[in-house]
C-alpha cells in the first residue's frame, strides 16, 4: 500500500475542509456587518486568502520551515525525502491555517478599513510575523522549544493552533482595531456604547455552521498523516464545541450571536490539547470558553470601548489563550490526560505568542497608518465600503428598483 499517496489524499481533504472554513469566516462577517458593507466583507476574505497564498509560498513557509519551492518539479516531489509531493500538500494545509490569521483580523476591523493598505498588512503578517512564531513552535526553530523543555520539563504543546493560529490572530487584531479606531456612531460623546445591529442573523448562523464543520479538518488532520489520525481529537472537538455553545446560550441569555460564536469559542479553545485531554475535560474547556466569550465581548466593547466588530479579540485571542493554558492543566495524567505537558511550559509558550502578536499588531498597523493611511474617509464610511470600494451593493437589482 502506498502510504505516501494516502497521506497526500488525507491532508488534501483536510486542506479543503479548512479552505471551506474561509467561507464560514466570510458569512459570519457578512451576517454581522451592516448591509452596506456585506460585499466588502466577502471580497476581503477571499482576496486576503489570495494574498496570503502568495506571501506564504514565497516567504512564509521558508521562514517557518526552511523549505523553498523554487526548484525543479523533480525535486519538489521529494522535498523532505517524502514522495508523492507530500510537502506541497503540507504547504497547502498549513497555508489555510496561516490565511486564517487575516480572516480573523478582518472581523475586528471591518466596515472602516481601506482595501489595499489592509492587503499589505496581510502580506506582512502571513509572510513574516505569523510564520516566525509558527516556526518557533511547530518547526522548533531557534532552540525555543528546547529551552522550554529544559526550563519547565516539557515543550509547548499546541496540536492544532489555539495559540499559534487563534491567539495570534486575535491579539494581532487588538493592535489593528485600536490603531484603526471605532466606527462612526459606535460610541456617544459620553462614551456610552450605541448598538449597531447585525444585518443578517441567518448568514451569521451559516458562517458558524460552515466553520464548525470545517474545524474537524482543522483539528483531526493536524495529525499530518492518515496513520496518526486520532478519534480522540474528533471526540474532544465535538464536545468542546457543544460545551461552548450551551454555555454561551445560558450566559448570553439566548442571544443567537453568542450561541453561534460560543460554539466557535469552544473549538478555538480545544485546538491546543485536543489530542491530550479527556472528553469530559474537553466539554469543560469548551464551556469555559463559551462563558469567556460572552463576558469578554461585553467587556471589550462596553468597558474598554474597543470596537471589535465580530468580537475576535475575546473569541480567538482570549479563548485561544485559555486553550493553550488549559492543555497544561487538563492534559496532565493527574487530570486524566495523556501527559507530556506541564502547566508552566504551556503558560510561558502561550504568553510568548500573545506578546509577539500584540507588539507586531501595533507596529504593523501603526506604520501602515502613518505611511499609507488605513481608514476609509468619513464620507466613504458613511456610504459603506461596498459602494465606496467596489461600486456595487449586495442587492444591486433591488437598489436599482428603488430609484
Image (cartoon, helix red, strand yellow):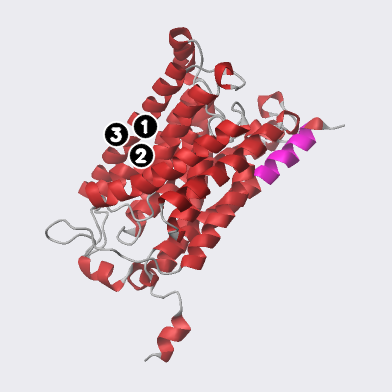
x and y percentages locating residue 14 in the rendered image: 66, 43
In this view, which residue lies farthest toward the left?
Answer: 190
Q: For mark 2, does the 10 Å Cα neighbourhood hold few (<14), some (14 to 19), or many (20 or more) residues?
A: many
Per the image, the residue denoted by label 3 is 359
Quote the CA–CA distance across marks 3 and 2: 9 Å
Between residues 67 and 340, which one lies in front from this camera angle?
A: 340
Pointer 2 or 1: first along the chain: 2
The residues colored magenta run: 4-14
Q: Is residue 383 magenta?
A: no
Q: Residues within 10 Å of mark 1 (few under 14, many from 20)?
A: many
Q: Nearer the viewer, mark 3 or mark 2?
A: 2
Determine the residue located farthest toward the top in the rendered image. 150
Please determine whether, in this image, residue 14 is positioned above or below residue 111.
above
* Mark in front: 1 vs 3: 1
Q: Which mark is residue 171?
A: 2
Report the residue marked by disc 1.
Answer: 354
Give coordinates of residue 123: x percent, y percent.
41, 45
Q: Is residue 346 above or below residue 114?
A: above
Majority secondary structure in the magenta region: helix
Query: Residue 73: x percent and y percent?
Result: 69, 37
Numbered marks: total: 3
Quick one: quadrant of the N terminus?
top right
Kindly identify the residue that appears in the image at 40 percent across and 54 percent down.
107
Helix, strand or loop status at disc 1: helix
Amino acid at each position: 500500500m502506498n502510504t505516501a499517496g494516502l497521506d497526500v489524499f488525507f491532508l488534501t481533504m483536510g486542506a479543503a475542509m479548512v479552505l471551506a472554513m474561509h467561507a464560514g469566516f466570510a458569512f459570519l462577517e457578512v451576517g454581522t456587518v451592516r448591509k452596506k458593507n456585506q460585499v466588502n466583507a466577502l471580497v476581503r476574505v477571499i482576496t486576503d486568502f489570495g494574498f496570503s497564498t502568495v506571501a506564504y509560498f514565497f516567504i512564509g513557509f521558508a521562514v517557518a520551515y526552511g523549505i523553498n519551492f523554487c526548484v525543479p518539479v523533480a525535486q519538489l516531489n521529494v522535498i523532505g525525502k517524502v514522495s508523492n509531493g507530500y510537502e506541497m500538500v503540507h504547504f497547502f494545509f498549513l497555508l489555510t491555517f496561516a490565511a486564517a490569521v487575516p480572516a480573523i483580523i478582518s472581523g475586528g476591523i471591518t466596515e472602516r478599513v481601506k482595501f489595499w493598505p489592509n492587503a499589505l498588512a496581510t502580506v506582512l503578517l502571513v509572510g513574516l510575523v505569523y510564520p516566525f512564531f509558527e516556526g518557533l513552535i511547530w518547526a522548533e526553530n531557534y532552540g525555543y522549544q528546547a529551552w522550554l523543555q529544559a526550563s519547565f520539563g516539557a515543550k509547548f504543546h499546541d496540536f492544532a493552533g489555539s495559540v499559534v493560529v487563534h491567539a495570534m490572530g486575535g491579539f494581532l487584531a487588538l493592535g489593528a482595531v485600536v490603531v484603526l479606531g471605532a466606527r462612526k456612531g459606535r460610541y456617544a460623546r459620553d462614551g456610552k456604547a450605541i448598538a449597531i445591529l447585525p444585518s443578517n442573523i441567518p448568514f451569521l448562523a451559516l458562517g458558524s455552521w460552515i466553520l464548525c464543520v470545517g474545524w474537524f479538518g482543522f483539528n483531526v488532520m493536524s495529525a499530518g498523516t492518515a496513520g496518526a489520525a486520532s478519534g480522540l481529537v474528533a471526540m474532544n472537538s465535538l464536545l468542546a464545541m457543544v460545551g461552548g455553545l450551551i454555555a454561551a446560550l445560558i450566559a448570553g441569555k439566548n442571544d443567537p450571536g453568542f450561541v453561534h460564536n460560543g460554539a466557535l469559542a469552544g473549538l478555538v479553545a480545544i485546538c491546543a490539547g485536543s489530542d491530550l485531554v479527556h472528553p469530559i475535560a474537553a466539554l469543560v474547556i469548551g464551556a469555559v470558553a463559551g462563558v469567556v466569550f460572552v463576558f469578554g465581548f461585553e467587556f471589550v466593547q462596553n468597558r474598554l470601548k474597543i470596537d471589535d466588530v465580530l468580537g475576535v479579540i475575546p473569541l480567538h485571542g482570549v479563548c485561544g489563550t485559555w486553550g493553550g493554558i488549559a492543555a497544561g492543566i487538563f492534559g496532565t495524567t493527574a487530570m486524566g490526560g495523556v501527559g507530556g505537558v506541564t502547566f508552566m511550559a504551556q503558560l510561558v509558550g502561550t504568553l510568548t505568542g500573545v506578546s509577539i502578536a500584540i507588539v507586531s499588531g501595533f507596529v504593523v498597523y501603526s506604520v501602515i497608518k502613518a505611511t499609507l493611511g488605513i481608514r476609509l474617509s468619513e464620507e466613504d464610511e458613511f456610504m459603506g465600503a461596498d459602494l465606496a470600494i467596489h461600486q456595487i451593493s449586495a442587492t444591486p437589482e433591488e437598489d436599482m428598483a428603488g430609484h
